[in-house]
Image (tube, rainbow, N blue to C red):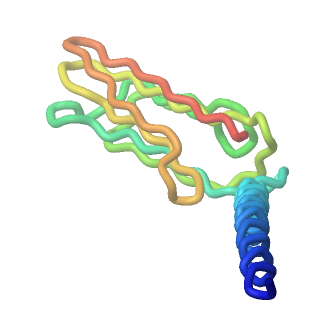
Amino acid sequence: MSILIDVLFIDFCLKNMSQFSKFFLCSIFFICGIVSCKKKSNSVYPHTVSIQYRITPSSGISQATSVIYANETGGLTNISNQNLPFSKSFSRAVNRGNALTLRGDASGTGSLKLEILVDNSVVKTATFTGSSVITGQISYQFQ
């Protein structure tokens, strides 16, 4: 009789341990999920970032007829007849929803690669091609 009670007790414990283990593991995964979804500290606005704009031409294109970019104050700067490749760097305080934009125009056959970098990481890039006129614009919005 004692052996039967011991076997029943062990069986009861194993069944409950299994349910407890499942609950425990689910709880751990849930907590890990919540912690990993926490926003990074650099998502707090406003904060200052380094911004770099780059325009790289294909061979044969040495000048942009126009370069327009969002500047240090959030306004637009327009440069005519800019030698390529073009690069502009500065630091600026940004808020959620602020946007960066870069536009490049050139005459000729080839391509222009436009890039926006924030804190030395490329956040937006695109290559635009044309056979007589090349026009391209990219934008990035802070989330």
Reply above or below: 134 against 67: above
Residue found at x 21% / y 35%: 58
Which residue is farthest left?
Answer: 60
Give the quadrant of residue 40. Answer: bottom right
* Coordinates of residue 95 in the picture (x, y in percent): 81, 44
Reply above or below: 4 against 85: below
46 or 31, which is in the foreground?
31
64 displayed left or right of 41: left
Residue found at x 80% / y 87%: 2
Q: Is residue 120 visible?
A: yes
Q: Is residue 48 visible?
A: no
Reply above or below: 65 against 114: above
Which image quarter holds the N terminus?
Answer: bottom right
Residue found at x 55% / y 53%: 89
Which residue is farthest top?
Answer: 132
Residue found at x 39% / y 43%: 86
Give the quadrant of residue 143. Answer: top right
